Image (spheres, grey):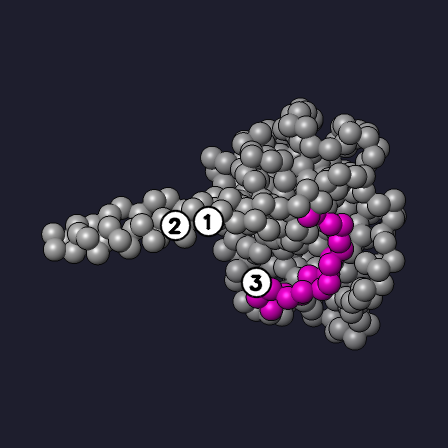
């Protein structure tokens, strides 16, 4: 890489001037530094990534073509400008990008603000957010288009679209073997529900039938240019009201949900949900009035050793 010689010459000149002015205690103001970085046009790569641990929580990146989650979005601050993303690209707050903890990189997702119905496509090319209780970090421009900047957070839905184009080419049709076989996925141990005991005394809400959120607007195939972020803001229908909960787990057996709720204590409740002909018993607390309340509840529950607790948005 070629570097300019001007800084070296400037330092030499500055040194002479300082020596000449020592008798009068003259001080020279330094010239601004040049932070320009030259990056090859194909610096970004497609990657899934190895399992990693942050603050005693393990994350397992993997292919997730059916990813469709609700939660809390935040956005990047200026401290990240000009730094490399997890797949080798440069972060620019003016781009429509985002960070996610486990999706492959880069992929395109649709982010819908469930508070105002605004929906855009962004390119996920980085890891994060690592603040507990957030599911995606948006670039400044993406946050502006979704009206997230003012409050700092928003209740959102994140839906997978497909792999994003790489600089200078289209995405691979499938995961390259050298990436897929680099490290076998680390399975998350399933809960041994039969080993848990019945612990009564925790209230159980009557079963409710799951009502899915309205489908986001259809997206073109991932190879089509229109599937890449364009800045187009779509307006989609959203529920009249959404609520915040901190959820610890979901079980097919009531007694196992009761035991977990009892071990955590506090105001944990069991909510029964009908999904696909099966009843699931969710252990969670809420509804909570604000993101701040949800953050406080998440911190308390995580402090009991419940590393899988997360903030969810529900109707």
How many other residues sit within 10 Å of disc 1, few (<14), some (14-19) or many (≥20)? few
Q: Are marks 1 and 2 in contact (CB under 8 Å)?
A: yes
Task: Write down the region rendered in magenta.
Answer: 43-61
For label 3, the residue is 301
Determine if the magenta segment contains residue 141: no
Q: Position of residue 111 (x, y in %)?
A: 67, 37
State the count of labels.
3
- Point out the residue furthest to the left here: 24
Give the quadrant of the C terminus: top right
Q: Position of residue 155 (x, y in %)?
A: 60, 40
Instruction: Please tell me which residue lies in front, 310 or 56.
Output: 56
Type of secondary structure dominating the magenta stretch: loop
Q: Position of residue 151 (x, y in %)?
A: 48, 38
Disc nearer the start of the sequence (1/3):
1
The secondary element bearing badge 1 is classed as: loop
Residue 202 occupies quadrant: bottom right
- The alpha-carbon separation of the residues under discs 1 and 3 comes to 56 Å
- The alpha-carbon separation of the residues under discs 2 and 3 comes to 59 Å
Residue at horizontal 87%, vertical 58%? Answer: 177
Is 153 left or right of 100, judged from the image as shown?
left
Instruction: Please tell me which residue lies in front, 299 or 188.
Output: 188
For label 2, the residue is 9
For label 1, the residue is 5
Q: Nearer the viewer, mark 1 or mark 3?
A: 1
Vertical order, 261 against 101 (above or below):
below
């Amino acid at each position: 890489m070629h570097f300019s010689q001007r800084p070296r010459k400037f330092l030499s000149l500055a040194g002479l001037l300082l020596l000449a002015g020592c008798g009068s205690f003259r001080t020279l103001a330094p010239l601004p530094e040049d932070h320009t970085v030259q990056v090859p046009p194909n610096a970004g790569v497609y990657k899934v990534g190895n399992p990693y641990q942050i603050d005693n929580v393990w994350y397992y990146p993997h292919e997730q073509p059916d990813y469709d989650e609700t939660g809390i979005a935040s956005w990047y601050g200026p401290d990240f400008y000009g730094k490399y993303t997890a797949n080798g690209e440069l972060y620019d707050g003016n781009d429509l990008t985002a960070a996610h903890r486990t999706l492959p990189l880069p992929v395109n997702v649709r982010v819908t603000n469930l508070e105002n119905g605004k929906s855009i496509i962004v390119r996920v090319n980085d890891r994060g957010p690592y603040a507990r209780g957030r599911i995606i970090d948006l670039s400044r421009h993406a946050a502006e288009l979704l009206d997230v900047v003012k409050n700092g957070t928003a209740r959102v839905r994140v839906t997978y679209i497909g792999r994003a184009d790489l600089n200078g080419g289209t995405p691979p049709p499938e995961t390259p073997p050298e990436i897929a076989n680099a490290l076998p996925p680390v399975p998350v141990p399933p809960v041994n529900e039969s080993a848990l005991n019945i612990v009564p005394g925790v209230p159980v809400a009557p079963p409710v039938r799951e009502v899915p959120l309205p489908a986001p607007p259809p997206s073109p195939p991932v190879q089509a240019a229109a599937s890449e972020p364009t800045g187009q803001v779509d307006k989609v229908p959203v529920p009249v009201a959404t609520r915040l909960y901190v959820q610890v787990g979901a079980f097919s057996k009531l007694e196992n949900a009761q035991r977990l709720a009892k071990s955590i204590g506090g105001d944990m409740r069991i909510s029964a949900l009908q999904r696909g002909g099966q009843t699931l018993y969710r252990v969670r607390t809420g509804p909570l009035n604000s993101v701040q309340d949800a953050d406080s509840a998440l911190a308390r529950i995580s402090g009991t050793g419940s590393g899988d607790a997360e903030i969810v948005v529900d109707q």
